[in-house]
Amino acid sequence: MWHDHALDNLEILHAAYMKHAFARHAHKTFAIGLIECGASAFFARGTTHTATASDIFIIHPDEIHDGRVIVPTGYTFRVLYPSLQLVQHLAMEPGHTPLQTPFFPQAVIKDCQLYNLLLTLHRLFYTHLIPWNVKECSRRPSRIF
């Protein structure tokens, strides 16, 4: 995971999991994720959600959730972890006060155009914000077995 201090400590993750399951936990930030291949299931908002290739998933700050692999091939994903303040700033219309806490009603979004825009954004961050020496150490996504 990489942090960008210029963007309010935006965290950037690109990883692959083959067997791993996350216990229930929460983040202080939003988690805006993109499933590149495979499939994952996670419990959030009182129900279990399934995210497959080309899906976007969104977890709100302090939202209890878990996550697990649901296919034999695992899954590869990218996640942006923007702070509440950064999301408020990005959602704010000029001349208005920030929203309290932006709320995304769907935990999983199926929107190919939005997925491709977010994928491009993540790749740009990954390519231009992460120092070359960090990328050289791990050209492929992290793998946890």
Image (tube, rainbow, N blue to C red):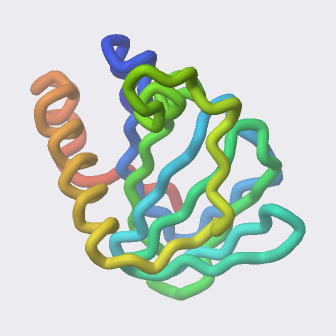
Q: Say left or right for 83 vs 61.
A: left
Q: Position of residue 18 (x, y in %)?
A: 50, 70
* Up-down relation of residue 47 to residue 8 (above or below): below
Residue 29, visible in the rendered structure: yes
- What residue is drawn where x is 44% and y is 16%? 8
Q: Quadrant of residue 61?
A: top right
Q: Position of residue 28 (x, y in %)?
A: 68, 29
Residue 38, visible in the rendered structure: no
17, 8: nearer the viewer: 8
- What residue is drawn where x is 76% and y is 41%? 26
Q: Say left or right for 86 vs 50.
A: left
Q: Quadrant of residue 43?
A: bottom right
Q: Position of residue 103 (x, y in %)?
A: 66, 49
Q: Quadrant of residue 29?
A: top right
Q: Say left or right for 145 vs 112.
A: right
Q: Furthest-top residue in view?
A: 5
Q: Furthest-front residue in view?
A: 95
53, 46: nearer the viewer: 46
Q: Position of residue 135 (x, y in %)?
A: 18, 35
Q: Say left or right for 16 vs 71.
A: left
Look at the image and tell me in which quarter the N terminus lies.
Answer: top left
